[in-house]
Amino acid sequence: MTNEFKEDSYYIEQINRLRKERNAVILAHNYQRGEVQDIADFVGDSLGLSRQAASTDAELIIFCGVRFMAETAAILSPEKMVLLPDIQAGCPMADMITAEQLREAKLKYPAATVICYVNSSAEVKAESDICCTSTNAIAAVKSVNGRQILFVPDEHLGRYVASKTEADIIFWPGYCPTHYRVLPEDILKAKERYPQAKVIVHPECRLEVIMLADEALSTGGIIKYVSESAADEIILGTELGMAYRLQKDYPHKRVHLATEKLICPNMKLITLDKVASALEKLQPRVTVPENIRIKARQSLDRMLAI
Ligand code: 13P
Ligand code: SF4
């Protein structure tokens, strides 16, 4: 038995005791560390986690993900306490637009409908008309019936959606630093090495990368694809945690990460000891001021209605 295993089992025992005492639900994104995914009540993509947060009976939500996800839970479930085990776990893309910058852009494009990717702050959601995740971005764009769209903050997701819908979209120059690192040559090399494999990437990748893939899907979409597809070998163009999830659920399939650069350091900040500590100390807590929450909720509700 290694030391690491002993340490994990110590925290797992603490987590299991405290989650009952506190009536807590532990939600984890698909990019979380394997050991964090393993203790979660629900592991999923941004949309699935939002739905869980909105419908849970638990009094306490431990959000193993990044800040905008915990904020979304706090917006949808204001009566619950939402904890983010490491308050430094942010999303750099979400920080690439502020509410002030968005207000200025809205003055410049007064006729545009603002669609914000869920990877954004509560203040930016409050300034937007509709929110979307990578699962429903195309549907959100189609729902505005041909009106001009200001799509923030992910330029790459915006360009992907535009390529699928021919919508009139004004892009914002935001990007995910993790998915941006994937280059077309990484995909070409992986395809050369594993010629039988299907290439599945996240739509946060550059469009040149997406064009080389068989599918561009949200993390939830990737799981669905792998579960339904006959393909037993996958080249994965998204974060490392997704490979853990797929190998756990489908051990007979071979999953190759397109490049070892695909690690989101922010997602990896959440560790078992921090989850145990959050449950014990009931912090760090994520809250959203009520005036922002009410407005942000409207853009999220429009998304959940799609
Ligand atoms: P999903 O909604 O596909 O899980 O993506 C969230 C995310 O942050 C991807 O980088
Ligand atoms: Fe943000 Fe990218 Fe990390 Fe997702 S993978 S949380 S978009 S930095």
Image (tube, helix red, strand yellow):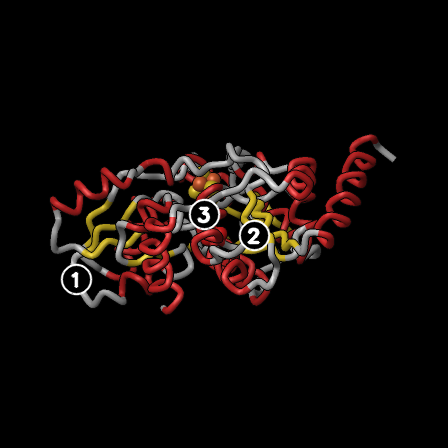
Badge 3 crowding class, 10 Å Cα cut-off, few under 14, some 14 to 19, many 20 or more, is many
Q: In this view, does 227 lie to the left or right of 238?
A: right
Q: In this view, does 166 lie to the left or right of 48?
A: left
Q: Residue 234 carries which label?
A: 2
Depth check: 220 or 210 in front? 220
Q: Is mark 3 within 8 Å of ligand 2?
A: no
Quarter where residue 132 is shown: bottom left
* Identity, as a three-letter code, of the amino acid under mark 1: Arg
* Identity, as a three-letter code, of the amino acid under mark 2: Ile
Q: Residue 71 carries which label?
A: 3
**In the image, what residue occupies the spot 38% across and 40% down?**
94
Q: Report the mark closest to the observer, 1 or 3.
A: 3
Q: Report the mark closest to the observer, 3 or 2.
A: 3
Give the Cα distance between marks 1 and 2.
37 Å
Q: Report the mark closest to the observer, 1 or 2.
A: 1
Q: What element carries label 3?
A: helix
Q: In this view, does 104 lie to the left or right of 295?
A: left
Q: Are marks 1 and 3 in contact (CB under 8 Å)?
A: no
Q: Is mark 2 on a helix, strand or loop?
A: strand
Q: Which image quarter holds the C terminus? A: bottom left
Q: Looking at the image, is mark 1 or mark 3 earlier in the sequence?
A: 3
**In the image, what residue occupies the spot 47% across and 48% down?**
69
Q: Looking at the image, is mark 3 or mark 2 earlier in the sequence?
A: 3
Q: Name the residue under label 1.
A: 147
